[in-house]
Amino acid sequence: MENFEFHNPTKILFGKGQVSNLKKEIPAYGKRILLLYGGGSIKKIGLYDKVISELKEIGTHIIELGGVEPNPRLTTVNQGISLIRENQLDFILAVGGGSVIDCAKAIAAGVPYDGDVWDIVTGKAKASSNSVPIGTVITIAGTGSEMNGNSVITNWETNTKAFFNSNHVLPRFSILDPEITFSVPLDQTIYGTVDIMAHIFEQYFHASSNAPLQEKIGEAILRTVIETAPKLVNDLNNYEYREVMLLNGTLALNGLTGMGVSPDWATHLIEHAVSAVHDIPHGGGIAIIAPHWMEHVAATRPEKVAQLGVRVFDLDRTGKTDAQLAAEAIQSLRKFWTSIGAPTKLSDYGIDDKEIELMTERSMLADQIGNYVPLTKEDVRKILRNSL
Amino acid sequence: MENFEFHNPTKILFGKGQVSNLKKEIPAYGKRILLLYGGGSIKKIGLYDKVISELKEIGTHIIELGGVEPNPRLTTVNQGISLIRENQLDFILAVGGGSVIDCAKAIAAGVPYDGDVWDIVTGKAKASSNSVPIGTVITIAGTGSEMNGNSVITNWETNTKAFFNSNHVLPRFSILDPEITFSVPLDQTIYGTVDIMAHIFEQYFHASSNAPLQEKIGEAILRTVIETAPKLVNDLNNYEYREVMLLNGTLALNGLTGMGVSPDWATHLIEHAVSAVHDIPHGGGIAIIAPHWMEHVAATRPEKVAQLGVRVFDLDRTGKTDAQLAAEAIQSLRKFWTSIGAPTKLSDYGIDDKEIELMTERSMLADQIGNYVPLTKEDVRKILRNSL
């Protein structure tokens, strides 16, 4: 392991009816609130009304910003910053999925910053301890954003997706009610499943040594997802499956399996480049790219892919080389994702080879990306071509 | 799962040389410090000098309280409370194992309380948000006290061990340097190993439903302990083994595997009664009692013990009943603990049947104890007799 600091003070309120704790949690942070949400599904399922009634009960002043996009945009972040400054708001309540929460984090960090918030998103400046406090009501399993300091934002002027991480924008509390996730449609449920697994992969394929516990916890999460997701996609209103997936999503990216290791994140970087050029769902992009990334990795370092196959997909090691096991592991992963209905080719989204160069370009935040097996531009181009 | 709240804001600083961060972490809490430690081993290994030099560098005023007992005593807690009140101290730095940290927590909670601190330890009163802030430098893997709000205190006047839990006494930060644990002798290393496993058992054998992820994470910790401990007991100065065991201990009892489930804790309650009557090491007592507790449980509910056998001890399920698997699982556990040198009988500590009644009496904090299989007084008497 490498030396590490772990500090995750987000308070999790998990279970049925936890929204009714909003009136207990919010008063510590102030009376003037930015209510942030997405495309309006929270209105359809009655969550919006519940939240508003909670907020009114404690006499808050509410300014709303709805319509946050699935890949949240810098323009929306700037709108939120202006609303908070103009109305002197104290607190952001983000009600939605990862996009809404990620957007809240960028707004939170941007408010006390004098320059362009894009500086913070791209790492040129740091989020400060004066960032506006955030609370969340999460509506989908997968993102992990409800218990981490990560935020991914898209700048459509430059077709660039960038991300930052800061403990200063960690949600102060997050409400996780499995019943709220009943309304997540099949496709989004599939994307969330893929995203959870990919979050584990990015940390599992780390560039450090001696992290058996972190790896075994990652495997525990993967096995739980693999057990639960096939049942869930056939029974979307099942509380028991929804609660397990919701907890999977939170624990997959709250720092737990990343303790003391250098994660990879290449698959996410490539997917971010794809969905910054074509506005496709993040989990869909990941499902397509991850197996090709894993094949590239297995060509030079098959041992960890083989370990994944044995420990997560129950492959029999007898008489097989790591390379053979790795190939079987990737086949098992593909089979599993296909079985729950995940997409397999970028062409499913109408993406063809005309934009390979632009997507490759956008992936390369440095000369090489990734850690477990660092990727050159040529490697990324190849992975993207194989994904078409 | 049951509805739950999870909020663990302890900052973990893990790795070599992290003691040098004391000077960064402490100033937020004040300049006047109670330095709490145990029997003086921290002086032998040079840790005391390092800590003092850190504290002097930031100009703190230090009052020392050394000699905290392995089963920390109410009298010592009261001494600490007096020292803080008389000297108007702001912060407690606990340098030691679980006993020192548990003692710090009781002191922290007792300072702002008007009555007898024993009221808080026994649950008659609650720790308040005015509890004195605590930081820790942990010297042994096993307790988990460095990242939870638990505290176990012994009242020798009444031969009673009691415990409380409060988020108000959670350490603000804990320093976990595996090198510091090199000096833990073989017997304490064994007791720590047993304690970590028992902490998982107490949560694994919960009385709730649908917690597959929590159980799998528990199994991940158990498997990691079973892989690592046999190597560690033969190579006490091995950094890689020590770091893995240290992380195992912290994650085994920081709330992670207990999310949304009602834990059991009967084994701990019985052991606390034993070591409140005879001052034996906690981990030693647990190693003796836990297998007998598990046998009692397997007689009526073998299925989870069988699951433990299959998933943690790699038992082959083919053609076996749960009862058979459970018996094999308990045998595997015994074999493992014996292999690393854990004690197996209370008579090893010179305890005989004369005190069975007193120990039984002291175990029964209620008419029944435990959750997975609630134990009557008669059950506890039987488990203790079998443990002789």
Image: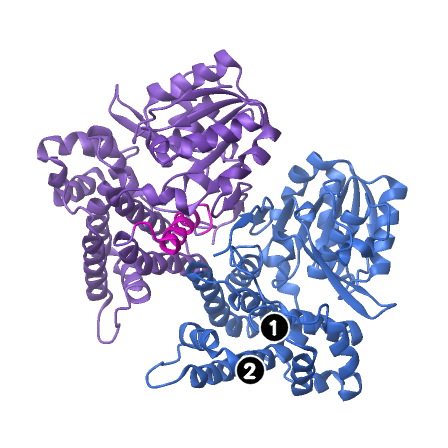
Chain colours: A blue, B purple
Residue B374 shows in the view: no
Q: Which segment did they paint magenta?
A: B236-256
Q: Residue at x 48, y 76 (%)?
A: A305
Where in the figure is residue A21, as x and y percent of width and height?
Answer: 63, 42
Q: Is residue A224 above or below residue A169?
A: below
Q: Is residue A265 above or below residue B197?
A: below
Residue with the most extreme right position = A86
Q: Is residue A189 magenta?
A: no
Badge 1 crowding class, 10 Å Cα cut-off, few under 14, some 14 to 19, many 20 or more, is some
For this rendering, which residue is in front, B42 or A224? Answer: B42
Dot 2 amino acid type: Glu
Tell me where residue A27 sits by quadrant. Answer: top right
Q: Chain of mark 1?
A: A
Q: Is residue A152 found left or right of B225 in the rendered image?
A: right
Q: Earlier in the sequence, mark 2 or mark 1?
A: 2
Where in the figure is residue A337, as x and y percent of width and height?
Answer: 56, 79
Badge 2 crowding class, 10 Å Cα cut-off, few under 14, some 14 to 19, many 20 or more, is some
**Circle 2 sits on which residue?**
A295
For this rendering, which residue is in front, A169 or A236? Answer: A169
Instruction: Name the mark on residue B170.
Output: none
Q: Residue at x 74, y 49 (%)?
A: A126
Dot 1 amino acid type: Pro
Q: Is residue A182 found left or right of A317 in the rendered image?
A: right
Element at label 1: loop
Q: Is residue A322 found left or right of A349 in the rendered image?
A: left
Secondary structure mostly seen in the magenta stretch: helix
Element at label 2: helix
Instruction: Name the mark on residue A374.
Output: 1
Q: Chain of mark 2?
A: A
Where in the figure is residue A345, as x and y percent of width and height?
Answer: 66, 85
Q: Is residue A237 above or below residue B368?
A: below
